[in-house]
Image (cartoon, coloured by chain):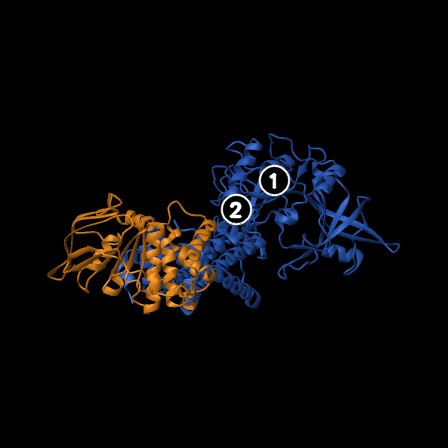
Amino acid sequence: MMPLGHCLALTLGALKRNRLQTVLAIVGMGVGVGALVTSVALGRGAQQAINDQLRAAGANVIVVTAGNYLQGGGNVGTHEGGELMGTPNGPKSGEDGTSHMSYRGMGAPWGGRFIKVHEEDDPFAVHDHPTAAQRLGDSMAGLGAAATLTRKDADAIRAMSGVQYVASSIQEDQRLKVLVEGEEKTWFTYMRGTDDTLPMIRTGWVFPRGAFFTADDVKASRQVMVLGRVAADHLFGHDANPVGQTVLLWNQKFTVVGVLGSRSWAAQPTPGDHEFDAFYIPITTVQKLLDLGKLNTITLTTYSVGDTTQIAREVVDLLRQRHKINARMPDDFTVRTEAQLAIGHGLPPDVARVLAGNMAGMDQITIGRIADSLKRANNTMLTLLAGVATVSLLVGGIGIMNILLLSVTERTREIGLRVAVGAQRSDVIMQFVGEAVLLSVVGGLLGTAVGALASGSLEKLFKYSIDISIASSLAAIAVAAVLGIIFGVYPARRAAGLDPIEALHHE
Amino acid sequence: MSIISLRNLTKTYQMGDNTVHALRSVSLDVEQGEFVTIIGPSGSGKSTMMHILGCLDRPTSGQFLLNGRDVSALPRDELAGIRNKQIGFVFQGFNLLPRTTALENVEVPLLYNRPAVPAAERHKRAMAALTSMGLGQRAHHHPSQLSGGQQQRVAISRALVNEPSLILADEPTGNLDTKTSIEVMALLQELREKRTITVVLITHDMDVARYGTRIVSIRDGQIVSDKANAPMRAAEVMTPRSVVNG
């Protein structure tokens, strides 16, 4: 076998002699590879943009709320129902059918805050477990709801596969007090005791001042606080920096560590929005100060938007098992996907009621479906682009074959001589395939550079979402090399098949 | 043992409907250290003979023993190995690779040695071959920068680099002027005398044939005469100075 170094020198020499054809062949291959790299970058970028947007929209968020605000018959929210929300086929119990419908129609668990109806709140109901009133301290958890969720539940959910982040929360309305320049200011707002993971779940959040509290703060139950934009503005004045200041809650001193704002113009902080007109403190601090063991909500995200509905079902199964709820009993918690919450969001309560009450599968045609169809559309685009790129690659490959065939004809005497002095078939084939691979790899490198440049400018000029990966660039170069081999074999075999006697006398 | 032994060698070609008999039952033995010139007009079959002797072609029938081994029916790649190791070719048109230095040209046969020769070793051997031809100073010149005589000397260096036992020269002086031709013949004679390399030279020129120790005439695919010759001394014909200057 010919040494690689000589093969390379030889190849370079041959290519130098046919400079124009060499350049054209390399450009041809470069265009093909460039098109491939660009289309893959565009496709991956689009895929990621869709995922990011869906995540930002909360399509992968699941909220588990303590208590089940759906009152009534045993079929509501039961396991056999197979529905997260319960079956829509009307009240079987027959008693108080209207209210049954209306509560279910409230859609969002937040809605339940205003109309607190739970089995435990029915003074005539007989319970097989201690009610909220009997559980000392838990009534302090706010909402007066059945506090059925624990940190252990949250840990169990965190251990599920496909679950990305989990944050447990306790929330209720609270009064905050500050002393600014000797003057006492108060603001009645929404408290949320939660985990440090919440900002990971709420991807639309930004922190114009400071940052969210840390895992250490949670672990050590520190008295630190993150103020929502609205609360901060009301307590400290517009655009003031409250980080480091002290705020009083339950007459306890809390240090402000951050201010929470919104990334999106679509969700501007407004008074009463429970997100930015709110404050956040470590859940452990709330539990310690109030001596609470239970949670109001567990919020979690899934890695994939497509898995959200499935994981929501699994959470229902898990919690029913953990809470030892038998098949006949309703859930003592509510699991909602953000998609479900979105249905009712912004609608007049009547409409929301009708929607949610009558269309049980409504959530399934929302964001999840949109995500799927967006991805399908993007895949179609990708396939098209990849098709175009493949055609250009083929054209590039044929260009290489062309220059090699020309080269074989031009160098017939050389081949004849090499065979005469002892070159075997494999030596000749190696030489020409080597040339093809060199041409195509150089073309591939050039194409990758051009593709990266083109993708980069698309990103800069047209704000396209681009994702260039080293792996895909390497793959493109590998594809070019393989094409070089494929298109080099025919000319190489022709060269190796030459009769040395004729080749030596070729003019 | 004869270095070359042809036994009833026949070669026929099919040209359309006609069968061309290029060689008709040729038998010939060449001993180690002979300088055989094969002479014949064009179409006599001398080129066919040359190709068969050079293992570039196979006979239709008969035997060709090279160094005692029958090579008449060996597969293509094995013949390539034999050409590489045992035969050195000198062509009329030199067949040097253009835009490639003299040194690299001489290295070409070494590239196809099995097992492979390391680059440094290739370099050394090629340089030694060139130096023995008086071209050490020209090793890094391209063929286009060399005279015809120098080019043929590069080609002879290439033929010698694998230390073959047989040099096959096909009209080696066909493209050279008289003076340069004589120099090349002197080199070939020297190879035979100093290294006992067997030389088989094919020509149509009786002046060139006279440098051999044996002249074989061939016509219509048959040997018509085969006689020993008191070779003309090329070194005596030319002035010694011209060997150095080429």
Front one among A380 and B116: B116
Query: Dot 1 lies on which element?
Result: loop
Quadrant of residue A420 within the rendered picture: bottom left
Q: Amino acid at mark 1?
A: Gly
The Cα atoms of the two marked residues, 2 and 1, are separated by 21 Å
* A35 relative to A295 in the view: left or right: left
* A214 relative to A456 in the view: left or right: right
In percent of width and height, residue A82 lies at 47, 40
Q: Is residue A429 visible?
A: no
What chain letter is assigned to the residue under label 1? A
Locate the C terminus of chain A by quadrant.
Answer: bottom left
Q: Is residue B108 above or below residue A215?
A: below
Front one among A404 and A394: A404
Query: Dot 2 lies on which element?
Result: helix
Q: Amino acid at mark 2?
A: Thr
Find disc 2 in the rendering and name its residue: A308
**Which mark is on residue A67?**
1
Which chain does the blue colour mark?
A: A
Front one among B52 and A466: B52
Q: Earlier in the sequence, mark 2 or mark 1?
A: 1
Q: Is residue B116 visible?
A: yes
In percent of width and height, residue B160 lies at 37, 53
* A237 relative to A267 in the view: left or right: right
Q: Is residue B115 above or below residue B183?
A: above
In percent of width and height, residue A37 lies at 48, 59
Residue ranking furthest to the right: A182
What chain letter is assigned to the residue under label 2? A
Chain B painted colour: orange
